[in-house]
Image (cartoon, grey):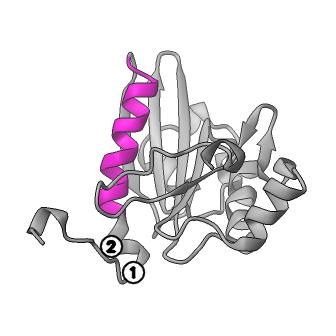
Amino acid sequence: MTASSKKTYYRTEREMYPDVIDWFRNLLSSRFPRSEVTVFDTSRVLLRQFIKRQGLQQHFPDHLFYEIQVDITGIVKSSPKILLAFVECKLNAVNLRDVSQLLGYSRVARPSISVILSPKSCSRSISYLIETFGRTDVLQYDTNRRIRIAKWDTIKKDGSCVASLRQER
């Protein structure tokens, strides 16, 4: 097995961040080609503090209530609008508690894109809830906005299978 084909194992979520940041920057840049895109590890700072440090308070008048810590935050500057995008990284299969965490974050800050990803995809109960019972409503955080669950490919460093579970399989 060559070094480039060797499977990467992450010991912590934090070890995933550099790879996920690169992937997310590329995803946002392709989705918003005429915009300035920046992506940050925000796992150790409250989102309200991050927004203030970036000088974006005027674009998010309710930012003082963003008492949340998102793993990775993307900023998309497309004059005159500025959009947020979130990624939560999980090492284990995404479960209902993980989805609920990101759902809360997303309902508060209303990002344009909200993704939760894991090298192990999602738990059997989440899959069953969404696929068997059609409960995609548990992923909805705003009008026409849903959390996307993605399986992180540790070899390709890619989570491009971002879609609803029903479309993924």
Residue numbers of the magenta segment:
17-33
Q: Position of residue 117 (x, y in %)?
A: 53, 60
Q: Which residue is mark 1?
A: 12
Q: Position of residue 47 (x, y in %)?
A: 56, 56
Q: Is residue 85 above or below residue 40?
A: above
- Quadrant in which residue 44 is drawn: bottom left
Count how many numbered circles sit on residues in the image. 2
Q: Amino acid at mark 2?
A: Glu
Residue drawn at (48%, 76%), measured in percent from left and top? 91
Q: Is residue 135 above or below residue 28?
A: below
Residue drawn at (19%, 70%), measured in percent from left and top? 6
Residue drawn at (71%, 54%), measured in percent from left and top? 65
Residue drawn at (37%, 29%), measured in percent from left and top? 29
**SS for callout 2:** helix
CB of mark 1 within 8 Å of CB of mark 2? Answer: yes
Cα distance in 3D space between marks 1 and 2: 5 Å
Closer-to-camera residue (121/89): 121
Q: Which residue is mark 2?
A: 15
Q: Position of residue 131 (x, y in %)?
A: 79, 54
Q: Amino acid at mark 1?
A: Thr
How many residues crowd around disc 2 within 10 Å: few (fewer than 14), some, or many (20 or more)?
A: few
**SS for callout 1:** loop
Q: Residue furthest left?
A: 2
How many residues crowd around disc 1 within 10 Å: few (fewer than 14), some, or many (20 or more)?
A: few
In terms of secondary structure, what is the magenta stretch mainly? helix
Is the N terminus in the top left, top right, bottom left or bottom right quadrant? bottom left
Apparent side of residue 112 relative to residue 2 in the rendered image (left or right): right
Q: Position of residue 16 (x, y in %)?
A: 36, 67
